[in-house]
Image: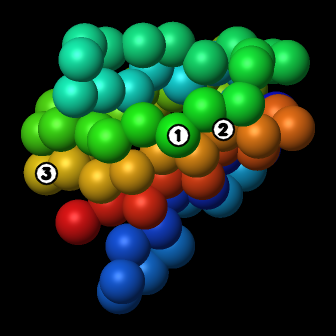
Amino acid sequence: MTLEIISAHEITFKGEVESVTLPGKLGSFTVLRNHAALISVLTAGDVNYMAGGERHSISIRGGIADVNNNVISVCIY
C-alpha cells in the first residue's frame, strides 16, 4: 500500500509501506493492506510506519488522514 505524508511546504514521505500507525483524535490506530476507507483527524504524536522491513517515525503536530483503496494520504501541519 502507498503512504503519502504531505504538508503545505513539502512532501515528507511517499512510498510503499507494510503498515502505518497514526495518532487519531480518539486514539492511535493502525492501517494494514485492504483497510476499510476512513477519514480521521490526527493529533500531535508520531506517525509510525514499516517500509522495507524497517520501522520509521515522523513526529507531527496534527493533521488529517484519508485511507482509501490501499492509499493512506496524511496532510500534516
Three-letter amino acid code at the position of disc 2: Val
Horizontal placement of 1 versus 64: left or right? right
Q: Residues within 10 Å of mark 3 (few under 14, many from 20)?
A: few
Examine the rendering and report whether any part of residue 9 can be seen: yes
How many angstroms separate mark 3 from mark 2 (CA)? Answer: 19 Å
Label whose residue precedes the other's in the sequence (1 or 3): 1
Q: Nearer the viewer, mark 3 or mark 2?
A: 2
Label whose residue precedes the other's in the sequence (3 or 2): 3
Horizontal placement of 63 versus 68: left or right? left
Q: How is the image coloured?
A: rainbow
Q: Residue furthest bottom?
A: 9
Q: Residues within 10 Å of mark 1 (few under 14, many from 20)?
A: some
Picture layout, residue 2 above or below residue 22: below
Three-letter amino acid code at the position of disc 3: Arg
Quadrant placement of the C terminus: bottom left
Q: Nearer the viewer, residue 28 or 40?
A: 40
Q: Residues within 10 Å of mark 2 (few under 14, many from 20)?
A: some
Q: Marks 2 and 1: CB-CB under 8 Å?
A: yes
Q: Which mark is residue 55?
A: none
The x, y position of residue 64, in whole percent, is 39, 51
Examine the rendering and report whether any part of residue 55 can be seen: no
How many angstroms separate mark 1 from mark 3 (CA)? Answer: 17 Å
Which residue does the image show at 58% across and 46% down from the upper left? 66
Which residue does the image show at 45% across and 20% down from the upper left? 21
Picture layout, residue 30 above or below residue 70: above
Say which element carries label 1: strand
Q: Which mark is residue 67?
A: 2
Q: Nearer the viewer, mark 1 or mark 3?
A: 1
The x, y position of residue 67, in whole percent, is 66, 38
- Which residue matches tag 3? 61
Which residue does the image show at 35% across and 86% down from the upper left? 9
